[in-house]
Amino acid sequence: MANAACTAFSQDGQYFAYCGSDGKLKIWETATSRLKQEYVPNLHLYSPCSVLCWISVNTQATTTSLSPWKKRRRKLISEEVEQKGIIAMGSINGKITLYDTAAAAVCGQLENGHSSCVTALTWSANCGLFTAADDYHIVEWNIKENGIKCKWKSGKAKVTALAVMQDGKSMISAERIIKWWNLSTKQIIRTFTGHAGQVTSLNPITVNKNASYLISGASEDGYLNIWALDETKNDKCSVATLAMQDEALSVSVHVNEESQVMVLAITRSGQAHVFKYQPNGRSKPLKPTLNIAVASDVHQKETIQQIPILMAKLIENEKLLLAYGSYMNLTFEKVTPDFSDKIQYLIRSEVKRTKERKEESVTKVKATITEDNVEYIVPGAGSTATKRNRTSSAGSQLPLKDRLENLSLNVETNAIGRTPSKGANMIQLLMQGLNSKDRTILNNVLFTKNERIIRNTIAKLPIQAITPLLKELCAMLQGKTYPSKIATMWLQILITTHAAHLLSHPDIGESLSPILSLIDAKLMLLTQISRLRGRVSLITGQITRSKEEQDNNIMEETLLVYQDADSSDEGPAVEEVDLESESDENWEEMSDQEEQEEHNEDDNKSVISKDENDSISS
């Protein structure tokens, strides 16, 4: 469902206003369910409506008439006081727009009161208009002068609901805590605490001179609290609680002659709950006296489908004014509640046929007859007029698909075997890109590498497009290597093709001076770049040679090289035999050398032992 803060009935119930997320204000006439007015405020998407309410302004209507008693014409002036319905719309940017429903135009705008989103509005015939916003301030406005009458701080939390008492001496504001203000001193009389969520609705009522009550509802709460507005008492609990099945979106209150309070609440589930409360002290939570629901006709579908009730209002004779359906197809109906049963179902079959009825009433043009053999004759033409053969004229033209492919920027996308036309060029796309300054088109055209297409395009280039093309090519020359290379190709073909015009152009120096200065700057860097290139090539050559020498040294210093067997069929057997023979010979030679060395060591040891014995004996 839509935000209930942006929907409201007028005080007399004749009109219903709604402002949706698209920022469009819609006003319906409840008696006929017709959409009477639509208004789109300025900056409706940048600062949409956040809350609205109906206000009444007294205007003096002056009527003049001629006096029939005297020849001299005199005007008889009579002034009548009229009530003019105005919708006050608070926006996200803190401004309040006043929309006159009679004139169907904006009649004023209240500014400099709030610096942030307006969150609550209320109107009193005795006191005027009050607003609250996210800046934690409450403002009392002077409608006649479109100025601020009074402004004071509301507290440390965002005010989400406002209400003024009938006597105009006090006002009530609510966030999670409900505050009762004295309007003369701007001081808090009492506070009421009993809701867990943000309070969304406040409905003060006066039963008699000595008894006043407040009915409050909050978001995500399945009940309504009734508070006693008595300065002498300091009760922390509510007098009564009205229990519901879901959160209340809108609440309407009426006090009858018997001092009985009748409460009408619309829940988020789309049902209406009617309560009857007799103020007589504290009581237990009250259940609804009557539940009202709207459903579709059973004969239309196999299952019953509920039609949600969006808003409702208590009017005279304890009747209910219901608004049900959707905001695209809204229906209003006055219903007399039937308290003989706890549930009252309203079966409505016309809701589903509203669209068909609307189409039948809107369209008054007879449909064109397409059956039988009907011949249509142009006015002024004879019956023997020859019909134009469209197929023959269209046959000489290429199909749209082929024409789009001919305009394709990528030549490689052409089908295999299809040769492009001899005059292939992109002059149309180039002119379009130069005129619109579209970078996508210019990049696709100027970055082509086909020299033949470039020549054909330059050849058909108009004279007035040469200077803009030179500016684009100059910008490409200042880019990286690839754009500069392609721009050089375009520039060379352009100068050679249109040399006569360039020489005769008086401002040729100004057109080519950026390109010449760019070429001179690059030529100045050519020597340094050449030296750098030589040094880099010298260093890379030395690195390569040193790496090769290192690899060769590693191969020469290797003691043992193991070579894996080749994948060929003949090679492995021969190499394995050779390796085995060489290894055997090496092992035999090493074993002989070891035996000879051991024999020599034994001879030396024997000689040494003999000498020692001789020395000992002597």
Image (cartoon, helix red, strand yellow):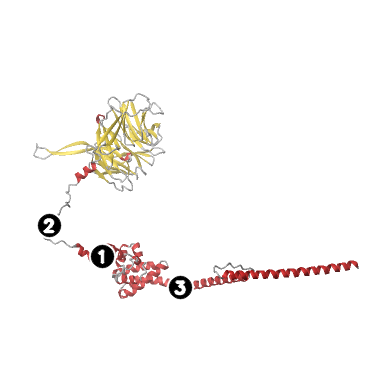
Q: For the residue marked with disc 2, what is the amino acid?
A: Pro
Rounded to the nearest angstrom, the CA distance separating label 2 from label 3 is: 78 Å
Say which of 356 and 277 sits in front: 356
Q: Which of 507 and 599 is in front in this view?
A: 599
Distance CA(mark 1)–CA(mark 2): 33 Å
Q: Would residue 530 be seen by someone viewing this image from the given angle?
A: yes
Asked if 225 appears above or below 536 in the picture, the reply is above
Q: Position of residue 583 (x, y in %)?
A: 65, 69
Q: Quadrant of residue 565?
A: bottom right
Q: Is residue 144 visible?
A: no
Residue that extends furthest to the right in the rendered view of this protein: 618
Residue 376, how many percent across, how many down?
Answer: 14, 56
Please identify the quadrant where the C terminus is shown. bottom right
Q: Who comes first in sequence, dot 1 or dot 3?
A: 1
Q: Mark 3 points at which residue?
A: 526
Q: What residue type is labelled 3?
A: Leu
Q: Name the secondary structure under disc 2.
A: loop
In this rendering, position of residue 399 left or right of residue 551: left
What residue does disc 2 label?
A: 379
Q: Mark 1 points at which residue?
A: 398
Residue 16 in the image, given as x and y percentages of width and height: 26, 39
Mark 2 vs 3, N-terminal side:
2
- Which one is closest to the eye, mark 2 or mark 3? 2
Instruction: Judge from the rendering whether residue 214 lies leftward or rightward of residue 537; answer left or right.
Output: left
